Amino acid sequence: MGRVTGYHLAQLNVGRPCGPVESAEMAGFMALIDPVNALADAAPGFVWRLQDGDGPGATALRPCGPDIMVNMSVWQTFQALQDFTYRSGAHLDAMRRRREWFRKMTEHHLVLWWIPAGHPPDLGEALQRLDLLRRRGPGPLAFTFREPHDPPAAPARSGEAALAP
Amino acid sequence: VVRDLSVIAVLGDPVRRRLYDYVTAQDHDVSRGEAAAATGVQRPLAAFHLDRLADAGLVEVTFRRMTGRNGPGAGRPAKLYRRTGAEHQVSVPPRDYRGAAELLAGVVDMIGGEQELQRAARSRGAAAGRSALRDAAGADQHDRLTGALSEQGYQPYPDGPDIRLRNCPFHVLADRYPPLICGMNLALLEGLLEGAAITGVTARLDPRPDGCCVAVGPSKKN
């Protein structure tokens, strides 16, 4: 999964925090945002991540309603994202503690999909992919770490929009 | 199962078992000479048994020219041995605890029971630690710690100020549910330190490409 394909891997995560970002419950999580994002930025294979101007990282964005936080990023390969997610101590440790800060979700809360390299996805597209995953389960257009899919075989054409689900 | 049984039967010989334990605990490829010296047997005997271990797939073989010698006259490359990723399990009568564990882990992950799992793991680790403390009465803290870790199958080794763990006892599950299982394992080890009354060190998540994701090192001063 490390070969050059013309595709990059996009990731969207949604979570329902246990309290407002300025609350005591969320203080531990908020303190980790900047250092863990800095680690991501320096990680091998990192391409891009969603940022807003208001809070650290993308913590001020609420595209799915006031009680849902999102994060989104792009990586050169599946392996690069998997290594950062599960093999970097600071991020794995944050994931270990996620129930201190986020309520469990009964639906999929993470979606992965392939995008033509050089074209960061917008949030609307990302939410469509999550919706597709939730409706149909993992497939080539929207998948998970546990059931990954290879990038499309044909090289991406420049400017090609991602397939509408 | 029959194949796993015949593989494990290869370890029945005590010399072979010592060589296996030595090679799989090292962080480097091991030469015949090193393995022989470490286990106190003659080199030809070590070579014979190391090759039986390799035939059974219990260790892997690589060939490498020793450093500093190249070109004609450098001699044959040395035969080196190292641990493999393969795992073997035998249970008589047949049991499938791994299948059950995978199911249970999947459900704990799905219902978001990480914190309950970590609490249970911490108390299990503490019980193991207390029993290690009883068994090793009089041993110093370092021996007590490495003894308890070895007893639990972690294969500890020193790494600078840290103790690293060569073996992940939950490898297949940790691969499939990293935050859940590595979080459980960290809680087990935190409990073990508490129960064995080990002070001044802390367990932390610090994954490497191989081995256990947890390292034990000096506590940070606040």
Image (cartoon, coloured by chain):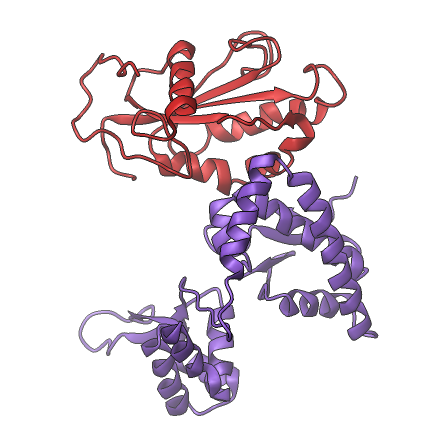
Chain colours: A red, B purple
Residue A84 falls left or right of residue B182: left
Query: Which of the image's four quarters has the N terminus of chain B?
Result: bottom left
Residue B77 is situated, as x and y percent measured from the top left of the image, at 27, 74
Residue A42 is situated, as x and y percent measured from the top left of the image, at 46, 30
Q: Is residue B113 above or below residue B46?
A: above
Q: How many marks?
A: 0
Q: Is residue B13 above or below residue A64?
A: below
- Whether residue B195 is visible to the viewer of this picture, yes or no, is yes
Q: B200 or A27, which lies in front?
A: A27
Q: B171 or A87, which lies in front?
A: B171
Q: B134 or A40, which lies in front?
A: B134
Residue B146 is situated, as x and y percent measured from the top left of the image, at 67, 67
Residue drawn where x is 50% and y is 76% of the image: B22
Instruction: Name the quadrant containing residue A3.
Output: top left
Residue A58 falls left or right of residue A12: right
- Whether residue B198 is visible to the viewer of this picture, yes or no, is no
Residue B156 is situated, as x and y percent measured from the top left of the image, at 60, 64
Q: A139 or A6, which lies in front?
A: A139
Query: Which of the image's four quarters has the C terminus of chain B?
Result: top right
